[in-house]
Image (spheres, rainbow, N blue to C red):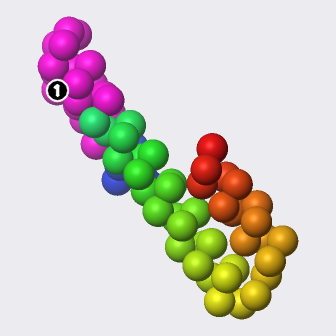
Amino acid sequence: MTGLSEDGKSIMELTEPGAVRDAGIIAASQKVEHYEIETYGTLAEFAKALEHKDTLKLLLKTLKE
């Protein structure tokens, strides 16, 4: 996550304000969001394997959101 955050900061430092910077910021933000979603998915699989039904239910609810 630190590396992803640094990518976003680099984009802001290395580009001028405008459409290119905006697109770069959006791309960096999407990487962070994707990482978060994948983490919840992995945790849901662990909860399923460990038969932690309440935890699985909460993780799947979060993923749906």
Q: Is residue 41 above or below residue 9?
A: below
Residue receiving disc 1: 14
Furthest residue to the bottom? 50
Name the element at disc 1.
helix
Residue 33 as seen in the image, left or right of residue 56? left
Residue 45 as seen in the image, left or right of residue 10? right
Per the picture, the main secondary structure of the magenta-coloured stretch is: helix
**Circle 1 crowding by C-alpha within 10 Å: few under 14, some 14–19, many from 20:** few
Q: Is residue 18 above or below residue 44?
A: above
Q: Please state which of residues 41 and 33 is positioned toward the viewer in this rendering.
A: 41
Q: Is residue 55 above or below residue 63?
A: below
Residue 23 visible in rendering: yes
* Magenta-drawn segment: 6-26
Name the residue rendered at 78%, 71% in the picture.
55
Name the residue rendered at 28%, 42% in the picture.
7
Name the residue rendered at 76%, 66% in the picture.
57
How far across and down, in percent of the image, does residue 24 sit?
23, 29
For residue 10: magenta? yes
Name the residue rendered at 26%, 19% in the picture.
22
Residue 13 visible in rendering: no
Q: Please state which of residues 30 and 55 is positioned toward the viewer in this rendering.
A: 55
Q: What amino acid is labelled 1 in the image?
A: Leu
How far across and down, in percent of the image, does residue 40 sit?
58, 63
**The N terminus lies in quadrant:** bottom left
